[in-house]
Amino acid sequence: MRISLTKDIFGKVEVPEGRLAGAYGPRRPERPGLEDGDLRDRIHNPIGTPPLREMARGARRVLIVTDDITRQTPLYRVLPLILEELAEAGVPESGVRFLIGLGTHRGMTEEEIAVKFGEAIPKRFPVVNHAWDDPSALVSMGRSGLGFEVMINRLALETDLLIGVGSIIPHATAGFSGGGKSIMPGICGEATIEATHWAALGYEMSEILGNFDNKVREAAVQVCRKAGLRFIVNTVMCEGGRVYGLVAGDVEEAHRAGVRLSLEVYGVPVAGTADVVIAEAYPTDIDLRQAIKAVCSADIVCRDGGVVILPAECREGVSPQFPDFSRYGFREPEALYRAVEAGEFRQKLLAYTLVAIGRIISRRVKGMLVSPHIGEAEAARMGFLWAPTLQAAVDRALEMCGPRSRAMVLREAGEILPLVPASVP
């Protein structure tokens, strides 16, 4: 049977007759995406808060924290509607600014900002990349519920009204993106971001990924309330860049409602598990550090001793921000974990990803990378097997797993949550 992925750079792949366990991806809702009028209505009628125009009355300074280019949120559609509400409340344009919640991602370029925000907004308002690595841009908010110090962008505390904008998808360290993630880790300092991710290693992946009620998310909400995040606007995206849903209002109540919508798109029932899982990295495939999110979803459905194939463009390579990423790789996760706990290795954010993914592809399954921008030697340093084409990867993986092995396809794997029947071992 011939199969293809969402991103067509890998071509069609032939899976032998009877050896395809299923092909899955984000659900394709038949209804059209929400129009601007629908989005406006949902912002007008928030969940758990008064309308934004009421909350903004009397505010002279408003900070809107957004997500970055690694997310699909159509800011160019959503932000003008928020600005309408602020104008209705009498907030002066000179008092509105935007802060891009990068976490530790690279800063967005002017060209990228113009595309994501629309050309008009950057011309009218200040749009600033979060300076996660600049101590002078950060201020302490004390300790989180998980015990670590929270350093946050000082702009969040120098405003009368703080708003968070993002999208909701399943997420390995917070349960779901959106909600409180705009603030923690979105606009926190490096040490806080590291500690947030490291805390997630204390739980099984199944306790966090796709689970709204988890300790990491609860700690983020606590920080958000202390920082004064009073209103969120979160979208749920679906095929073709359509907006499937939008929620607005309280950081917890609105987010919970948005998670239910997100599961209608990204919660994907699967028939069972498979020996070989083709986990498409798109759309989180700008570099390998982002692309390996797809491995987390594949981990749910890949049998012990199986192979996870990762087709990922990685046009920026392994991780231009973290050169040590390829130096350490995923080969020895427990040794790296012990080194961090002993204080011998201090790059916790880097170590988190290497340990979390390493525990999957070095201990339980094998990982095989297919990328036009990462060669065999570099893949091997990272702990991956490598194949020049997706077809070659599938052929090799099925051979490795034996004549009765079967393959499953997860399209856009980094943004879906496979739902395996409880009866499947």
Image (cartoon, helix red, strand yellow):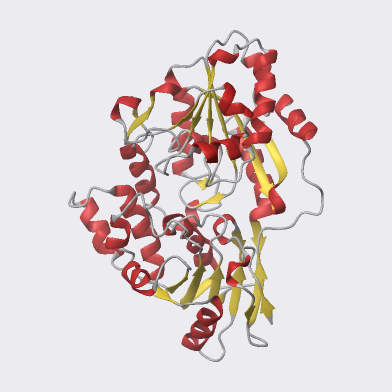
Image quadrant holding the N terminus, namely bottom right
Q: Is residue 67 visible?
A: no
Q: Residue at x 51, y 53 (%)?
A: 209
Nearest to the observer: residue 360 or residue 132 = 132
Q: Residue at x 54, y 73 (%)?
A: 277
Task: Tell which residue pokes out farthest to the top in this image.
Answer: 58
Q: Is residue 71 visible?
A: yes
How many numbered circles does the render carry? 0
Question: Is the residue 304 above or below the residue 254 in the image?
Answer: below
Task: Tell which residue pokes out farthest to the right in this image.
Answer: 31
Q: Position of residue 129 (x, y in %)?
A: 45, 33
Q: Position of residue 11 (x, y in %)?
A: 62, 73
Q: Is residue 190 left or right of residue 5?
A: left
Task: Tell which residue pokes out farthest to the bottom in this image.
Answer: 403
Q: Is residue 399 left or right of residue 335?
A: right
Nearest to the observer: residue 83 or residue 258 = 83
Image quadrant holding the C terminus, namely bottom right
Q: Residue at x 41, y 59 (%)?
A: 317
Question: Is the residue 303 above or below the residue 282 in the image?
Answer: below
Nearest to the observer: residue 279 or residue 381 = 381
**Which quarter of the picture shows residue 29?**
bottom right
Question: Is the residue 350 above or below the residue 362 in the image?
Answer: above
Q: Position of residue 157 (x, y in %)?
A: 43, 19
Question: Is the residue 43 above or below the residue 196 in the image?
Answer: above
Q: Position of residue 51 (x, y in %)?
A: 69, 20
